[in-house]
Amino acid sequence: MNLAHRKPLPGTPYDYFDAREAVEALQPGAWARLPYTARVHAENIVRRAEPVRIPDYLRQLVERRRDLDFPWFPARVVCHDILGQTALVDLAGLRDAIAERGGDPAQVNPVVPVQLIVDHSLAVECGGDDPQAFEKNRAIEDRRNEDRFHFIEWTRRAFRNVEVIPPGNGIMHQINLEKMSPVIGVERDAAGRGVAYPDTCVGTDSHTPHVDALGVIAIGVGGLEAENVMLGRASWMRLPEIVAVELSGRPQPGITATDIVLSLTEFLRQAKVVGAYLEFRGEGAAALTLGDRATISNMAPEYGATAAMFFIDDNTLDYLRLTGRSQAQVALVEAYAKTAGLWADDLKTAEYERTLHFDLSTVVRSLAGPSNPHARVATTELAARGIAGNLAAAREQEAQGLMPDGAVIIAAITSCTNTSNPRNVIAAGLLAKKANALGLKRKPWVKSSLAPGSKAVALYLEEAGLKAELEALGFGIVAFACTTCNGMSGALDPKIQQEIIDRDLYAVAVLSGNRNFDGRIHPYAKQAFLASPPLVVAYAIAGTIRFDIEKDALGHRPDGTPILLKDLWPSDAEIDAVVKQAVRPEQYRQVYEPMFRAAVEHGEAVKPLYDWRPQSTYIRRPPYWEGALAKPRTLSGLRPLAILGDNITTDHISPSNAILPDSAAGEYLAKMGLPPEDFNSYATHRGDHLTAQRATFANPTLRNEMVRDAEGRVRQGSLARLEPDGTVMRMWEAIETYMQRGQPLIIIAGADYGQGSSRDWAAKGVRLAGVEAIVAEGFERIHRTNLIGMGVLPCEFLPGTTRLTLGLDGTETYDVVGARTPGATLTLVVHRKDGTRVECPVRCRLDTAEEVAIYEAGGVLQRFAQDFLDATKAA
């Protein structure tokens, strides 16, 4: 620990590291110009970096240079159980590998504290109209996931520095916001003296920036990058683009935080902030509640930003008090922020390379969809956009006992985006109360659910008398977990599902989530729309997306007058009055104090090596030191597995939703003896590579440009064309054949490859298939780092060159030639079927020396094993 700039923190018993002093010594006057993000990184460098290198690293922040790497040491790693479990499966496999090579497996532990929340395993099999839905869904979750939960319990006892929050307690992001983040942390030095520092974390979910609303730099990373941080390595980075988003004005009456964030998502996508760190500032930002700020920060991946920061101010302190933090902690946050230059007033002089302006008063009530979170549509424009309309025909179908065109088959209040905002949830409850008073009902084909991210939500809804109102409309609590938004929407009523199939019905989902990619929410919901929680309730009553939600009648009063949305919508004053009366600090303390006492109790010791269950389809020893991955890589003679267009998401590459019986994974699970009702989701099986491999490009909405019909149109489906045979087959069969042949593969893609969830299996699956390189027009940040963590080479076409300009059809073979150094220009050699060849320059997207080292070692785990054994021999 560098001591040059360590000082007592006034008003506290702790010390702190004065990054301002260090920066000013380098360049007087520079501190006042630094954005919030750069100030937090400066403190991290001064406190943690090698002292001799500190001036060089700080100079990069001060001079806004991007030619060198600097280290970042996150204070925590936060995981949900899907990626957290797969990361720990990797570490358990690493222990096996270390033991086989003569090392001590018990010494392989996370160095950085890891907090794992089991929140992604529950499917909504029982909807919110069942009073016992929560208990039934939890029982199904435990039965289906017994293998997984057994392993997670072993990790809690076997590894140091791992805390586990068991299932049924909430979503990792909401728990992080409401409890886990101290905002300002304290660590003890060798003498026992406390040192205060800004909390920072990485999380195995792209929505980890949720807690950026508290002024905490928290970013989503892939499971492989998280493993790197867990094992004590710095996260090496170059100075990101830091963009100011100046918010002005105030929202109009009746506008929710969801409307704001959907409008911002559209605006920021258009502003091209992919990979940037955003800092929201201005009078509009200062007036937002912490819940509203968190709603905005949560959707950072939807507008493409890496982080979405707000500054520490009085609203931050008020929120810490509201959620039950101690007075001492609140006082520490205030003292540190005001002393160390992280208080909002101290950031007024910060300078930015780019400033965007957004007027909150321009926001109108909105939906997003279909298919993309940034595809916003004002509710007043639904008919003009072709979403609403022809309601008479839909109602005629309903009168005949049929589901209508555009049937809303799923209406879900879910996702930490919204349920960590009390105003949003209470607005839904108040709308339900007015609907019940007027005798309105949800349509019978709508599967409705409420899945809050925290148990505190249930307490304040109960206190407000709104829990029963939501239950009356079918929005009973089905879980405290990430459900529908993650594709865990559960089974439909068999009769409803069969009608959708028989009539090829256009059916949709409406949810208060953050993702609505095709095929994600449910296999039989052809499209999905994002909406605020009160709008979700309104659509459950309407029953069809063809309903013009602002104009059409949701029902009629006894005198025949129509009931419109405006008659149900609660006023801001009503919402604020309920929040003030019903949301209290003791509710959060009641929920979290016993939860976190239990999390640190490890119980009796277990063996350092896991006893793998050979018949498990959930947990299996990872294969990363075996077979093809143990052989030297080749970047010549590559065959294309797929040629893909723009906006390929990690859901396309490795879906997370329910496993259907006729899928490759479903057929495998049936052979393993699982009944179809217990197939569970792709996500839950990611600890078993034999199941997870079969999810690779298994999304039924995939469009592989190598597979076309007789008219030359690209066919949709999980399909591939085996080469050089030219035979079209299911993607998994093609992968199996290529694996048997030992054929190295390549993927060619368009822009924004790898959007969406930070899904390590989107990299693991292609690597195990034999993919050596991916050449795309551009990569989403998290997926690119996951590819490198698995030893897959990411390359980018230079501007003006694409798969289309090159006329690629998949009959070619490819070589990637050149020295793999950060940002180097390599050559993609295309060997065409007619014997001609094309040489095309591509940019190597190994962006740092650390990434090169990880790639050359074969991946994160191989690199760590190599270094661990070398260090053991040296000792």
Image (cartoon, grey):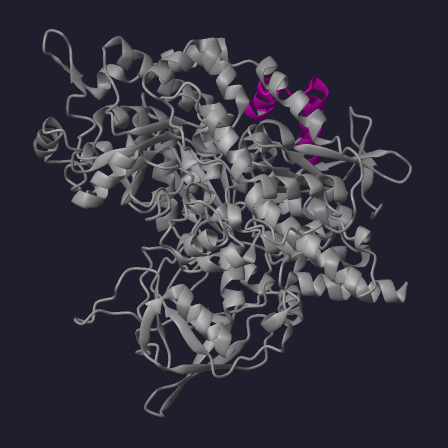
Q: Is residue 681 visible?
A: yes
Magenta segment, prevailing SS (helix, strand or loop): helix
What are the residue bounds of the magenta stretch? Answer: 314-341
Q: Is residue 702 magenta?
A: no
User: Would residue 728 be found to the left or right of residue 853 on screen?
Assistant: left
Which quadrant: the C terminus?
bottom right
Q: Is residue 337 magenta?
A: yes
Is 686 located above or below residue 284 in the figure?
A: below
Point 57% across, 45% down: residue: 219
71 vs 119, nearest the viewer: 119
Q: Position of residue 687 (x, y in %)?
A: 58, 51
Q: Position of residue 3 (x, y in %)?
A: 85, 45
Q: Quadrant of residue 259?
A: top left
Q: Is residue 784 visible?
A: no
User: Would residue 46 be found to the left or right of residue 498 on screen?
Assistant: right
* Image mark count: 0
Is 458 located above or below residue 757 in the figure?
A: above
Question: Which residue lies most toward the bottom here?
Answer: 835
Is 784 located above or below residue 578 in the figure?
A: below
69 vs 610, nearest the viewer: 610
Point 65% across, 61% down: residue: 860
Q: Position of residue 367 (x, y in %)?
A: 29, 36
Q: Quadrant of residue 336?
A: top right
Q: Position of residue 528 (x, y in %)?
A: 30, 41
Is 814 located above or below residue 22 in the figure?
A: below
User: Would residue 403 be found to the left or right of residue 817 on screen?
Assistant: left
